[in-house]
Image (cartoon, rainbow, N blue to C red):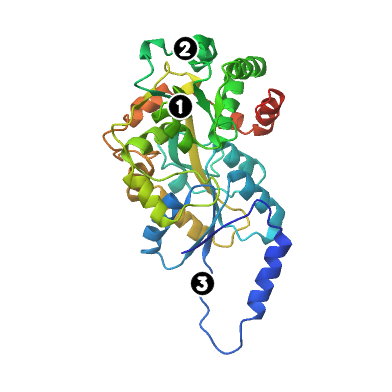
Amino acid sequence: MRRFSLPSFFPPLLLLACAAVLLGGCGGGEQQQQPAPLTVYSGRSQPLVDGLVERFEERADFEVEVRYGTDAQLLSTIQEEGAQSPADLFWANTTGALVEAQQAGLFTDLPDSLTTRAAAFRPESGRWTPVTTRFRTLAYNTDAVDTTALPSSVMELPQLAEEFEGRVGWTPTYSSFQDFITAMRAGHGEDVTSTWLSEMQDLNPKSYSSNTPMIQALADGEIDVALTNHYYVLRLKHGGAEGEYEGEEHEEGEEHEEEESANPNAPVAMHRFAPGNTGNLALVTGAGVMQRSDQQQRAQQFLQFLLSPEAQQFAAQQVNEYPVTEGVQVPPYMMPVEEALALSPDVAFRKLQNLDATLALMRETGLL
């Protein structure tokens, strides 16, 4: 397996120039030509992806090369590279990125053997498939918060000024938070969402660049509640790796240290809002095969593996994310998938695509 991370800006011409130099340096002579690797552009994190790729390569007759970046970085790079893009498969962290890639004509149609594998969240287009699911939640410090004071709707959170002024954590620059705001816009409208953001800022919330330090701050008593994804709480208490690419990956030793530092007695728990509330939003990760790829059959083979019981179980055990196929057991400390799904609102995928309007609204309200 070969892997590297894309910088935020990597001109496609420079990619081509580098390739030309490498090819030009290949000497003559008769050498057996090795099959080209399958190239995966991944917005998912290395600790999750590497483990799955290694398992896949044990049974495949070709290598997989992974290029890491945020969803936005990778989409931009693919579009800049155009017809010269080496990407065979785009494995995204957010539904919005998948829908954007689909509507840009980047994905090819998938066979029924792939599009029917997932039990839920199957897109109508048939051009990508969900791979795992995360859920939004309100995490809280069990030593500081009386759960009877917590609201049944995330929309009521700004009303708790007396209890939580200066004690709320959130991650405005984080893609999952932005998908959550996009879903709020879709379900409640632009004006209501704008008002919610403004009123939340009146609580003087603490902004974090990522969820891991925010949840640690919650455990340390620096804040009382935090808007986050469910698996960050489980990661703190039970161990596990990061699922979303957030920049430079940790060294392997650091990953093990994080997993060994799991604290099942950490004073952190999750509050579930009423069924159908935006605060319980299901967020789907997924992947699609690139239209321009000349390795579509191999890319489909890799997708089949990602939806296999082995890979789905790996994601549940290693990252605490929910499987999208039936019959896969989650760890006993996770809410059963049927219960988690029943809490999430039903939001059409296409409505999560309009991220630009969400970012514009967040800028208007001073969050970005």
57 and 167: which one is in front?
A: 167
* Picture coordinates of residue 41, whole percent (x, y): 56, 54
Separation (CA) of disc 3 from disc 2: 61 Å
Residue occupied by mark 2: 163
What's the mark number on residue 35? 3
Q: Is residue 127 left or right of residue 265?
A: right
Disc 2: CA contacts within 10 A as few (<14), some (14-19) or many (>=20): some
* Picture coordinates of residue 122, whole percent (x, y): 48, 36
Q: Which amino acid, mark 2?
A: Glu
Do tag 3 and tag 2 residues touch (Cβ < 8 Å)?
Answer: no
Task: Give the answer, above or below, for where 273 lies relative to 83.
Answer: above
| First in sequence: mark 3 vs mark 2 | 3
Which residue shows up at 36% across the image and 26% down it?
269
Residue occupied by mark 1: 222
Q: Is residue 263 left or right of residue 242?
A: left
Nearest to the eye among marks 3 and 1: give it: 1
Q: Is residue 197 left or right of residue 48?
A: right
| First in sequence: mark 2 vs mark 1 | 2
